Amino acid sequence: MGKKWILAIFLIVLSVLVVLIENTDKSNINKSINSDVVTLDSTTSNIEGKYQYFQECGFAIKAPCLLEDVSQQASGDFFLNYGGITDKENPDKITFYQIIVNRLPIGHKDLNKQELPQLADEFMKKSLAKLNNCKSMRFSYDEYPGYTAECTTNGYGQKGVVFWKDKFIICLTVISNDNLNSKFNKFTNSFKNISVLSESANSDAKITESSVTLNKQYSNKYFSLKYPASWQIVQEDNQVTGKTNISVQIMEKQKNDYDFSPNINIIVSSKRWKEPTSYLAEQTIYQNRKLLDSYYVIKQKNNIIINNCKGSSIEYTFNMQGYILRGIQYIVKKRDNTTFIITATVDDNKEMKQNDIINNIINTLIIQ
C-alpha cells in the first residue's frame, strides 16, 4: 500500500480544506454549484446503474436518481424515508421514487410462529391503506411475503410494493405517468440483500465495544482519542494552509504490500467558520467529484452529533488503483464554530470488520 495510498486518502481529505479556503469567495462557488452539483430533486446521470446501500436494513437498490433522506419533509412514524425525482422540469415524464422502512415493535421477538406473520401482515396492509387493487405476492428470489397496490396521486399513477424482511416492513413506490410499469419493475427488480449494519450504530457514530483493545492514546490541544497497538500515527500536526491543518492521521500498520490499511484523518480549522456544516458538506462533495471521477455519494446526513458537537456526515465510495474504497467524513462544529473534519477510509470489501475498529476509535474522541 505505502505512500500511494496515503496520497490517495490525502486527496479526499484535502478537498475539505479547499472548501474551507474557497468559502472566502462564496459567490463564485455558488455559481459553480448551481450548474454542476447534484441536488435532491435533480436527475443524476452518474448515479444510474449504481447501488445505494441501506445497511441498517440489510438491502441495496438502484434508482436513476440519488435517493435522499426526506424524513424531515414528511409526516408519519418511520425508520427510513428516502426519495428522489427525475425529469422534474417535464410534467409528462416526471417520476418520483421512494423507499419507506418501518420496524416491527420490539415485542415482536416474543411472538410465536403464528402471531409474528399476523403482526407483519397488519403492518403491511396498513402501509397500503390509501392504495387500490391490493394483491398478495412474494417479493424477490427470497420470496418475502408482501403486497402490491396502485392508485392515482394528484393526477399521477402510483404503484407500490410492501414486504416483510426480518424485522422490517419495506415499501418501494414509483409515481409517474411515463412508463410507470417499466420504471416500477426496473426499480424493484434491482433490490438485493446485503450484510446488516450493527443495530447499535446511530447518528452519533456509536457502536458496541469490539474485542479490539484501544490501549494507545493521542492528544493535543484540540482533542484526544485512543487507538489499538496495531495502529500507528503516520502524520501529526502537519500544517497544510494558513487556515487549516491536519492534526493527526492514524492508520493500521501495514501487513503486506497489497491490503489496504484502514485509517482516520482529523482536520481542525484554525478559523471559526460561520457557514452551516450542511453547506460545507455540499461543497466537499463538489470538490471531491472534481478530484475523482469514481467518487459516489451513498448518503449525506445533517443531524449527526459527535462528542456533543453537531454537524453533517458524507458516506461515499471511490476507486483507487483497482480497489473500491469506502469513506465517511464527519464535519462537526463546537459552539464557537471551531470546525472538525474526521475522515475514515476502509476497504469496501472488508467494510464491516474494519468499520468496527474505526467506529470504536471515533467513540473515544474527546473534543476539548
Image: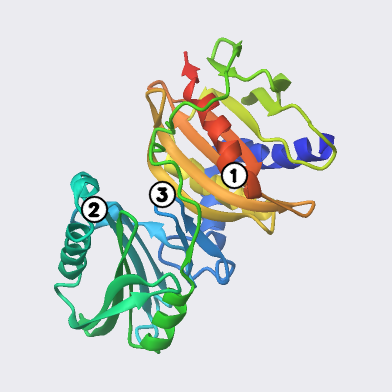
- As drawn, 368 above or below 65: above
Asked if residue 83 can be seen in this view, the reply is: yes
Q: Which residue is pictured at 23% across the width and 53% down the height?
A: 104
Q: Residue 352: x and y, percent? A: 56, 43
Q: Residue 128: x and y, percent? A: 19, 72
Q: Which residue is label 1 attached to?
A: 351
Q: Which residue is pictured at 47% across the width and 13% down the height?
A: 368
Q: Earlier in the sequence, mark 2 or mark 1?
A: 2
Asked if residue 21 can be seen in this view, the reply is: no
Categorize mark 3 by other alpha carbons within 10 Å: few (<14), some (14-19), many (20+). some
- As drawn, 185 above or below 244: below
Q: Residue 104's mark? A: 2
Categorize mark 2 by other alpha carbons within 10 Å: few (<14), some (14-19), many (20+). some
Secondary structure category for the residue under label 1? helix
Q: Quadrant for the N terminus, please.
A: top right
Q: Which residue is label 3 attached to?
A: 56
Categorize mark 1 by other alpha carbons within 10 Å: few (<14), some (14-19), many (20+). some
Q: Earlier in the sequence, mark 1 or mark 3?
A: 3
> In the rendered structure, which amino acid carries the disc numbered 3?
Glu
Alpha carbon of mark 2 to alpha carbon of mark 1: how far?
27 Å
- Would you identify the image quadrant in which residue 219 lies? top right
> In the rendered structure, which amino acid carries the disc numbered 2?
Leu
Q: Residue 326: x and y, percent? A: 61, 47
Q: Nearer the viewer, residue 291 or 326?
A: 326
Q: Residue 118's mark? A: none
Q: Which residue is pictured at 64% across the width and 41% down the height?
A: 346
Q: Earlier in the sequence, mark 3 or mark 2?
A: 3
Secondary structure category for the residue under label 2? loop
